[in-house]
Image (cartoon, rainbow, N blue to C red):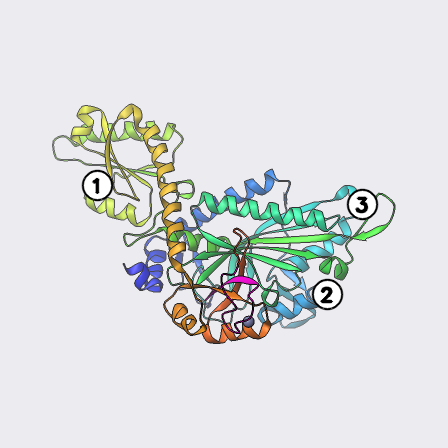
Amino acid sequence: MKKFENFSQWFDEILFNADILDNRYPVKGFAVYKTWGFKIIKRILQILEEKLDETGHIPMLFPVVIPEDAFAKESEHIKGFSSEVFWVTHAGDRELDRRLLLRPTSETAMYPMFSLWIRSHAGLPLKVYQSVAVYRYETKATRPLLRMREFLWNEAHTAHKNWEDAERQVKEAIEIYDGVFKRLGLSYLIIMRPDFDKFAGAVYSIAFDAWNPDGRVNQIGTVHNLGENFARAFEITYEDLDGSHKYVVQTCYGFGVSRVLAAIIAQHSDDHGLILPPEVAPIQVVIVPIVYKGVAEDVEAYAREVYEIIRRGGLRVHLDDTPDKTPGEKYYYWEMFGVPVRVEVGPRDQRERKVTIVDRLSFRRRVVELGEVVETIKGLFNEIIEGLRERSERTLKEFIKDVSDASALTKIIEDKKIARVSWCESIECAEKIREISGGEIRGYRIDVEEKPKGPCVICGREAKKVIYVAKAY
Ligand SMILES: [Zn+2]
């Protein structure tokens, strides 16, 4: 299969052929989201934003520019991001009094405002989100959707009375993301990132690492507990019940919607093209009339009747009645776009008041009565998402390889797999692991409990953690 043999080429072809994204925009790392891709993105965001709304988050929109002095307030944060920010230094030919930067993430855009807004314990928690583009001058090779210099995400930022409330918020954020990713049929590891690789300014960071056919992990979401780090830098305090003034405790989390789209494509699609979870497919059902000379009119009228029934059933349906294409060409075309269900309507279907239904995942054909078409398709949608989820989880398991001696580590990473090793938690051994493997230490899982089965893969002393090593986007 090309997908696993030459992921990069396969992926580029799908992006182009299925009208997802055009990477030929004349600025490196920036691209045009085309109609099909952008429609999917809007549906993914809709699912997420509904969840955020339900859990008390409020939408806002902050400016794309951040003044340098605000950006510089939290020392770890600026250290982590300064090398990759885009600066705005001029207006016309006049130099600006103070430099502005394009948000690489919005802590330093939001928190000066949080410090004005938050006054008393009664106003907490504050939970704000926005869906925007952010800008990072990635120095590694850019890849469409996976690593871009402008990328789309949803970021949420929260402020709480104390550490316990912030900890509860971290759990809620993980549940929200996990719920959305599961609805999309994705599989991933939920990872506690090592201290030396956490988000700049966080107390700790959690990542959702999705598998990718080339063995690199695709970080589709992150959740951070910021403690009081930013509250102290931005003077975000509240008056408690007893009249004392306290710093808020903050969390933030980012949902990488460009990368989520990349994961949907990479995990689910095949050599015929896209396979989309029905919930985010811009068109869920395509009707292809099969017409022959002489009976064309009857079949066309019947196809329109079928179309109306499916549309009224609440599904996003399209009737492909373009005249110059054969049914086969139409099948091939909509398979490329990942439309979950195809309904074929031929003379025999018309005579018997039946339709022929084919799903994009198994290509199995079923002939059903017209009266059962909507229920059958809805049932198929469930089968498709279950099938995608199951297949994706199986592949994730196949990607993970246990490594008990250091010499095997290099080969596992070269073979495009994710290595699982025991580690003593020392920085020296971490560096050795990185050096030998050429991969990154992603961290240990928090979605399942794993105890080391042997000693540290490098030094042979007692291992404290089971960690995952992989290349990453
Ligand atoms: Zn060790």
Instruction: Tally the numbered discs.
Output: 3
Give percent across and percent down for residue 334. 29, 45
Which amino acid lies under the numbered mark 2 shown in the image of this protein? Lys
The residue that appears at 35% across and 33% down in the rendered structure is: 379
Residue assigned mark 3: 120
Relative height, residue 285 to residue 451 (above, below): above
Pointer 2 and pointer 1: residues touching (CB < 8 Å)? no
Tag 3 or tag 1, which sits nearer the N-term? 3
Residue assigned mark 2: 73
Residue assigned mark 1: 323
Give percent across and percent down for residue 10. 32, 60
Work out whether residue 324 or residue 263 is closer to the camera in this orientation and state it. 263
Which amino acid lies under the numbered mark 3 shown in the image of this protein? Ser
Is 472 included in the stretch rendered in magenta? yes
Q: Alpha carbon of mark 2 to alpha carbon of mark 1: how far?
A: 63 Å
Q: Based on the displayed image, in which of its 4 quarters is residue 278 positioned?
A: top left
Tag 1 or tag 2, which sits nearer the N-term? 2
Q: Residue furthest right?
A: 243
Q: Residues within 10 Å of mark 2 (few under 14, many from 20)?
A: some
The quadrant in which the N terminus is found is bottom left
Give percent across and percent down for residue 367. 23, 31
Work out whether residue 295 or residue 437 is closer to the camera in this orientation and state it. 437
Q: Residues within 10 Å of mark 3 (few under 14, many from 20)?
A: some
Relative height, residue 47 to residue 89 (above, below): above
Residues shaded magenta: 452-473
Q: Main secondary structure of the magenta part?
A: loop
The residue that appears at 44% across and 59% down in the rendered structure is: 145
Q: Alpha carbon of mark 1 to alpha carbon of mark 3: how far?
A: 67 Å
